[in-house]
Image (cartoon, coloured by chain):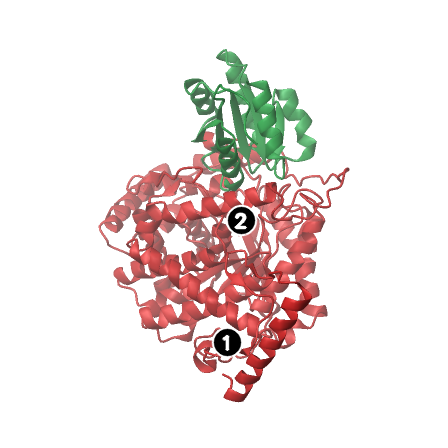
């Protein structure tokens, strides 16, 4: 990128600089490392990026490999959308928070509405609110929504053809079936629905060993994708959970590499099911964690765009730009937030959000400052939105696309992050691919080791957390936790019992039996039957939990691997 | 910090199988092991399982970790069952996302101490080490 004259000038100045450093600082070494361990120097020059090719490795926004942005013009035309997660209590309680956030300015695409809805722990795992396992958990950290009637309570009077609806749970198919059953009952054509499902059937990243066993999970996830490519081509069917991986312990390099490897595993499964990658890949999105190490995570994000574009084009032969684009939802860091002096979390989150904007993300959620205490209070939820609104309207950083491009440090580190991620991808390939690497515990053991090391570093004061191990206050302001209505469990149980009592039980049983048959066909590799059968079961008034249990008659559910605690 | 004891103190750490985020409790487990405790970790389905495992494993202390308010239901059950089965000398500790205003209530139920997010693990090690030596 630089001519001989510039390079020799740089060399000359570099030597002068190094001489000055040795003299003034008496030989002290100021090198350090990024949070993922990449060694870095105190300053960068053209010499550090002389071998980088502008066209192939940097380029311009909207041109393959899209490192600088998916789009030629980005925020100047359409800002990232606010995708603040919300959900608690009964569906009508969550609707209150939806309306409150929309009134506070939460914006979707082109100024429209967008709701990022999270399900409670039991719904996450296909457990109905009246089951023994659900006791104590109903509606506490997400919405308790398990039937089409619950969807009506939450989404009534919302134009689903103009609103982006994100549905967050782990056991996706049963819940998605009820959403579609609700939409059908409102006469909305399926291909006009807009939003996201997570499709997290197989991603037991963030601890739980309980979800579908990996191979069966991939089949279920692929059947959902298969259904979407045929009936809901605009629907974003799958979310690769980078934030979850980061929260469990992945550093920036591993977050990127493991997500790309997961995306490849999903796509390989789709290809085996007979799907064209250009029809399945555009519905995949990535949930990306933006953490403390400011420049590292920006460079990770840029490298990630480049890597994903090259994987989709080179490995899968994709032709559509939509397949090569890295569709991203940023979830700024939670594990780095502190319970001590919690208002300081606003400051941390603001920096994380700035990093995500300088990275060019397409959607964002910022946790509440009360994240270490509970789910967001109204005040915390609004402040998280304000962080994004100040960035958008007051800082001016959105006027120029990929504004850090050309920085010697940023281009050097972006290139290094790509190299490090490639090493991990090779490691996964050598281990026999993502599924084998995941099941062997290889991937999770890295996450655990890294999480333990982080905690050791904080406990030994090697890593500073302001207010926790440095600048500690003797007296702490008490922040009250937000609590959903205490009557939620009682009402949810009454409702689901009433739902079952008034249904045509013979019809429900018939639909669940048909679902089991469809699952058996899926297990033999026949796609296209399970998702429609789930929807029929939902229309026959089977609850989400009952649909899940029908699937469990065919697909194994339970601990998938055992990894030693302290590695 | 290492334990000053010849006896191997045994601790059961546990989260409900539906509890998603276990980074914290797993880091605590690693620190306890490094400090010389014997640590058993289980994911439980019913509070009864916690008590059965605690007795089977003959532990000195049980640490239950919660990301949501399920402790309101599960903790009194576990403490009640431990008493019923003659194991009331097992120390019960609670961790996770526990609002400050619930700490007194938990202690009234019989919880020895609450070590929630941001707690000092050395204090936890000291507490169990001194009480159970």
* Image quadrant in which the C terminus of chain A is located: top left
Q: Residue at x 52, y 45 (%)?
A: A453
Name the secondary structure under disc 2.
Answer: strand
**Letter of the chain shown red in the rendering:** A
Q: Which mark is residue A49?
A: 1
Res A407 → quadrant: bottom right
Q: Pointer 2 indicates a residue of which chain?
A: A
Q: Nearer the viewer, residue A354 or A193?
A: A354
At x 60%, y 66%, the residue is A42
**Sequence-earlier tag: 1 or 2:** 1
Chain in green colour = B
Relative image position of residue A197 (x, y in whole percent): 45, 55
Chain name for mark 1: A
Coordinates of residue B131 in the picture (x, y in percent): 59, 19
Which residue does the numbered mark 2 point to in the structure image? A118
Q: Position of residue A274 (x, y in %)?
A: 26, 63
Question: Quick one: label 1, few (<14), some, or many (20+) residues within 10 Å?
Answer: many
Give the residue displayed 65% in from the left and 39% down from the top. A483
């Amino acid at each position: 990128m630089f001519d001989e004259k510039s390079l020799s000038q740089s060399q000359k100045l570099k030597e002068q600089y190094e001489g000055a450093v040795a003299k003034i600082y008496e030989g002290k070494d100021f090198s350090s490392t990024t949070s993922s361990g990449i060694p870095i120097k105190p300053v960068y020059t053209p010499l550090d990026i002389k071998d980088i090719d502008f066209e192939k490795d940097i380029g311009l926004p909207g041109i393959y490999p899209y490192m600088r942005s998916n789009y030629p013009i980005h925020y100047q035309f359409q800002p990232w959308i606010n995708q603040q997660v919300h959900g608690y209590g009964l569906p009508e309680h969550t609707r209150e928070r939806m309306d409150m956030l929309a009134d506070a300015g939460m914006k979707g695409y082109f100024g429209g509405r967008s709701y990022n809805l999270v399900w409670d722990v039991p719904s996450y795992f296909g457990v109905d609110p009246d089951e023994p396992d659900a006791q104590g958990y109903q509606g506490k950290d997400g919405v308790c929504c398990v039937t089409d009637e619950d969807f009506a309570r939450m989404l009534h009077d919302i134009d689903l053809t103009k609103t982006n609806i994100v549905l967050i749970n782990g056991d996706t198919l049963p819940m998605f079936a009820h959403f579609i059953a609700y939409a059908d009952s409102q006469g909305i054509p399926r291909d006009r629905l807009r939003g996201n499902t997570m499709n997290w059937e197989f991603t037991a990243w963030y601890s739980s060993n309980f979800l579908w066993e990996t191979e069966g999970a991939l089949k279920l996830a692929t059947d959902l994708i298969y259904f979407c490519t045929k009936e809901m081509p605009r629907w974003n069917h799958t979310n690769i959970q980078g934030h979850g991986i980061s929260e469990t312990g992945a550093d920036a390099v591993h977050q990127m590499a493991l997500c790309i490897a997961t995306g490849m595993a999903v796509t390989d499964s789709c290809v085996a099911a007979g799907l064209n990658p250009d029809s399945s890949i555009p519905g995949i999105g990535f949930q990306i964690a933006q953490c403390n190490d400011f420049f590292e995570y920006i460079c990770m994000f840029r490298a990630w765009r480049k890597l994903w574009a090259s994987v989709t084009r080179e490995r899968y032969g994709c032709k559509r730009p939509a397949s090569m684009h890295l569709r991203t939802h940023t979830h700024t860091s939670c594990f780095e937030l502190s319970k001590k002096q919690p208002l300081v979390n606003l400051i941390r989150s603001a920096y994380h959000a700035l990093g995500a904007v300088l990275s060019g993300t397409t959607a964002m959620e910022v946790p509440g400052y009360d994240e270490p205490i509970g789910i967001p209070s109204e005040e915390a939820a609004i402040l998280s939105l304000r962080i994004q609104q100040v960035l958008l309207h007051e800082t001016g950083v959105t006027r120029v696309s990929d504004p850090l491009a050309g920085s010697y440090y940023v281009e050097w580190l972006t290139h290094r992050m790509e190299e490090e991620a490639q090493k991990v991808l090779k490691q996964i390939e050598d281990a026999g691919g993502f599924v084998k690497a995941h099941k062997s515990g290889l991937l999770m053991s890295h996450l655990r080791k890294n999480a333990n090391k982080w905690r050791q570093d904080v406990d030994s004061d090697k890593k500073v957390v302001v207010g926790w191990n440095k600048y500690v206050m003797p007296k702490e302001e008490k922040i009250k936790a937000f609590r959903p209505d205490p009557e939620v469990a009682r009402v949810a149980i009454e409702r689901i019992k009433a739902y079952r009592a008034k249904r045509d039980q013979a019809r429900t049983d018939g639909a669940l039996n048909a679902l089991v048959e469809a699952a058996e066909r899926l297990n033999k590799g026949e796609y296209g039957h399970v998702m429609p059968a789930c929807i029929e079961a939902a229309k026959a008034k089977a609850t989400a939990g009952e649909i899940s249990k029908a699937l469990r008659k065919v697909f194994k559910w339970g601990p998938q691997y055992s990894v030693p605690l302290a590695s | 910090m290492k334990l000053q004891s010849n006896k191997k103190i045994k601790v059961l750490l546990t989260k409900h199988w539906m509890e998603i985020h276990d980074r914290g409790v797993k880091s605590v487990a690693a620190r306890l092991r490094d400090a010389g405790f014997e640590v058993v970790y289980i994911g439980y389905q019913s509070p009864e399982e916690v008590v059965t495992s605690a007795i089977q494993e003959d532990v000195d202390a049980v640490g239950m970790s919660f990301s949501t308010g399920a402790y309101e239901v599960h903790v009194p059950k576990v403490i009640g069952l431990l008493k019923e089965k003659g194991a009331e000398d097992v120390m019960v500790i609670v961790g996770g996302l526990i609002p400050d205003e619930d700490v007194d209530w938990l202690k009234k139920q019989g919880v020895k101490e609450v070590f929630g997010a941001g707690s000092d693990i050395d204090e936890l090690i000291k507490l169990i080490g001194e009480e159970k030596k």
